[in-house]
Image (spheres, coloured by chain):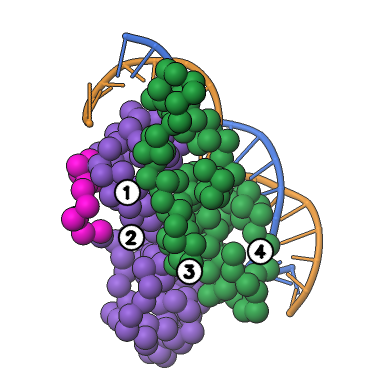
Chain colours: A green, B purple, C orange, D blue
Amino acid sequence: MQGYGWPGNVRQVHNVIETMLILAPADRNKPIDLDLLPAEIHNVSRSGDESELDVLMGLPLRGAREEFERAYLVTQLRKFNGNVSRVATFIGMERSALHRKLKALNIASDYQEGERMI
Amino acid sequence: MQGYGWPGNVRQVHNVIETMLILAPADRNKPIDLDLLPAEIHNVSRSGDESELDVLMGLPLRGAREEFERAYLVTQLRKFNGNVSRVATFIGMERSALHRKLKALNIASDYQEGERMI
DNA sequence: ATTTGCAGCTATGCAAGTGTAT
DNA sequence: AATACACTTGCATAGCTGCAA
């Protein structure tokens, strides 16, 4: 379990452990079967180069969604040289709503060409 | 403009055209400057192999989000051999809510190993 | 596994601002 | 002055999700 990243979601840890406690043998001296762990957490053998999408697949839904939106919006901002209005038009969203979202995701609105992504 | 996919979002088309109409020269005989088009739509030169993420970047927010979630959930279902409960646990979501979501996204819950994604 | 009703939270559109720069 | 854009905020409503059954 230490090999897994547990990407910032307490609830996930809680759920997994709870499940294991329920499925674990009553005898507290017996070891807990590794198969009780979800496959993803179990198989953390390949620690090499994952594609960006693959990384997101390892996150809980909320986090994955958020990271995707962040990447998406940063990309759009770059594409339109930081012009929020044009981004809003292109992605089909209200300008004000977009501002709110950028703030919530902590994305600097003046994302220009040279910036790094994620 | 015909070179662009206009991925299923009427609002986007509407907004872009509206913007062009506003920015276009008053003289209806003059051609409309291509630069009035958002960069993404303008530059559809590279019609080669885009990564999956890149494709999503060309969609309006709603569609991109939806496609991402679809890919995400299908991946999770494959990982857990179609076991909805385990997926729910891993992604930190209520089982019932996940069922609703799968239905809404039209994802068969019995996604197994061999299935194709997107 | 799968649905459904319901209550609460979140996201978003719309409207109406303020501020800055050209 | 006028325009364009950035940014904010209040409000109503639509959508999502947890919980219970």
Figure check: A70 above or below B77: below
Label 1 crowd (10 A; few <14 / some 14-19 / many >=20) = some
Q: Nearer the viewer, residue C3 or A13?
A: A13
Q: Chain of mark 3?
A: A
Distance (Cα) linking label 4 and label 2: 25 Å
Q: Residue at x 38, y 73 (%)?
A: B51
Same-subunit check for callouts 4 and 1: no
Tell whether A77 sits left or right of C2.
right
Q: Amino acid at mark 1?
A: Lys
Q: Which residue is mark 1?
A: B79
Same-subunit check for callouts 3 and 4: yes
Same-subunit check for callouts 3 and 2: no
Q: Chain of mark 1?
A: B
Q: Amino acid at mark 3?
A: Asp
Q: Which residue is mark 2?
A: B9
Asked whether disc 3 touches disc 1, contact meaning CB atoms under 8 Å apart, the reply is no
Same-subunit check for callouts 1 and 2: yes
Figure check: A67 above or below C14: below
In magenta, the rendered stretch is: B107-117
Label 1, secondary structure: give it.
helix
Q: Which residue is mark 4?
A: A109
Distance (Cα) linking label 1 and label 2: 32 Å
